[in-house]
Amino acid sequence: MKVVNIVGARPQFVKYFPISAAIDRYNSNNTETIVDVLVHTGQHYDYAMSKVFFDELGIRMPEYHLGVGSGSHGAQTAAVISKTEEVLLAERPDAVIVYGDTNTTLGGALAAVKLHMPVVHVEAGLRSFNRSMPEEINRIVVDHTSAYLFCPCSGAVRQLKREGFNRVLGDGMLVDDAAVTALNREPAVVADHPLAANTGDVMYDVLLTASALAEGRSTILQTLGIEGTEYCLLTIHRAENTDDPARFKELASFINAATAGRTVIFPMHPRTRKCYAESGAPLGNHVKIVEPLGYFDLLMALRHSSMVLTDSGGMQKEAFWLSIPCVTLRDETEWVETVESGWNVLYQNYTGAHRTLDAGLVYGDGHAAEKIVAVIAAGFCPRSSAC
Ligand code: UD1
C-alpha cells in the first residue's frame, strides 16, 4: 500500500519521526510493504522552525515541498488544499496521514477527502471547547472527515464517542495485538464508517528516544550560560496570546510575578516577535529572549528547568513526562490529564506551587507509532492490490 504523510508545522516534523521509523520497521518485518511519500507544505519555513528538525532527527528530505509559506487562514489553508491536491492526484495513495491541528492538517485532510482518499488523523479527539481558537476548528473538521482517528488517550476516545463515532477499536482500551488481529477480520474501513482507536501519543514515543540523545548532543545549557542555575523555560505562540497586545501584557505581568528572582529562558516564536514589540516589551530583565530552539536543545532546556510556562500543547506533555512543573498560559487545555495529575496548572489557578500525583501511563506506552502503523496495515493491506 502507499501512504502520503503531510507535515508543515514544527510539531508535525516531530510527530512524523516515529511514524516513519515504524513504517521502516513494518517493511523490514513483512513481505507486503508500505510506500511512504512525505509532503512538506512549507507552512513553517525558517531554518529554526523547520529544517533543524529534519537534520537532528535524521528525517529524509520530503519527496514534495509545496512552499505554501505564511498568509491569512484562508489563503494559507487554500494553498495547502490546492497544492496537496496536485500531489495526491499524481501519487494516488491508499491513505493520507495528517497530524494535529494546524492549517496544514486541515488543508491536507480536505484535499484528500474531496478526492475520496481515506484520511488518517494522528492526534484525534482532542478538544479545548474554545471555538475561537483556529486549532479547535481544524481538529473538529479533520476528525469529522477522517476514516481513521488515532487518539493519544482514552479521554479523546470518549469525546469522539460523544460526537457520534461508534466504531471504536477494543472499546477504547490501548490498542494491543489482539485488537489488531480482530481488525484483520473486519470489513474494510470506509469513509462513512470511521474507526477510532486509542494508540497513545506519538510524542511520548519520540520523547523516550530523543531525551536520552539530547543529553549527549545538546550544548544549549553552556551556550546560554545557565548550567547549574535554577531557571524557568517560557514559550508563547498561540494566536489568542500573540494577536492582542493587551492580552500579551496581562500574561507578561503574570510571568514577571511568577518567575521573580529566577532566570527565564524565552525561545521566541516568529509570530510572537511582532506582538512583543507592539506591546512595549513588558517582560522583566530576568527574561532572556533567544531564537527558537531545535528539538534536542528544547528537550535539554526543558529537562533541566525548574518550571515551564507555555501555551504549547506539546510542551505541556513533555513537562509532564519529564516531571517538570508546568504553568499553561491559556484559559483552558486539551491535555486535561496533565492538570488532573497536578503537574500542570492553568495560569489563573497558579498559587505559586504544584501538588503532584503519579498519573501513570495516561498517554500510552511509548509504542503509539507501531500501533498506528499496525492498524493502518490491517485496515488496508488485505484488500489493497498494492500490498
Ligand atoms: C502553527 C499552528 C499551531 C501550532 C504551531 C506550532 C495553525 C493555525 N497554527 O501556529 O497549531 O501549534 O504552528 O509552531 O496552523 N513564521 C515565520 N517563520 C516560520 C513560520 C512562521 O516567520 O518558519 C511567521 C509567519 O509569517 C506568521 C507567524 O509566524 O506570521 C505564524 O505562523 P503560522 O504558520 O500562521 O502559525 P503558527 O503560529 O506557527
Image (spheres, rainbow, N blue to C red):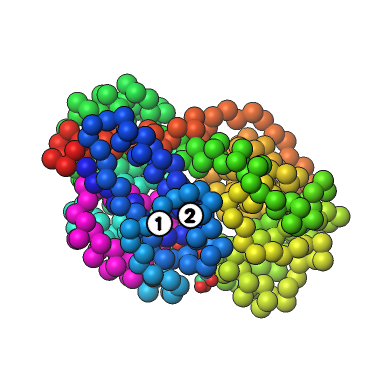
The magenta segment = 77-104
Quadrant of the image containing the N terminus: top left
Question: Magenta span has 73?
Answer: no
Q: Is residue 83 visible?
A: yes
Count of numbered tags: 2
Give residue 54's mark. Answer: 2
Secondary element at image label 1: loop
Q: Is residue 136 visible?
A: no
Mark 2 and mark 1 in contact? Answer it, CB < 8 Å.
yes
Where residue 357 appears, as percent x and y from the top left, is 67, 30
Quadrant of the image containing the C terminus: top left
Cβ of mark 2 under 8 A from ligand 1 = no
Question: Magenta span has 83?
Answer: yes
Residue furthest toward the left? 385
Give residue 61's mark. Answer: 1
Where residue 126 appears, as percent x and y from the top left, is 45, 46
Residue type at mark 1: give it.
Met
Residue type at mark 2: give it.
Phe
Q: Residue at x 82, y 66 (%)?
A: 285
Where residue 58 appears, as percent x and y from the top left, is 48, 49
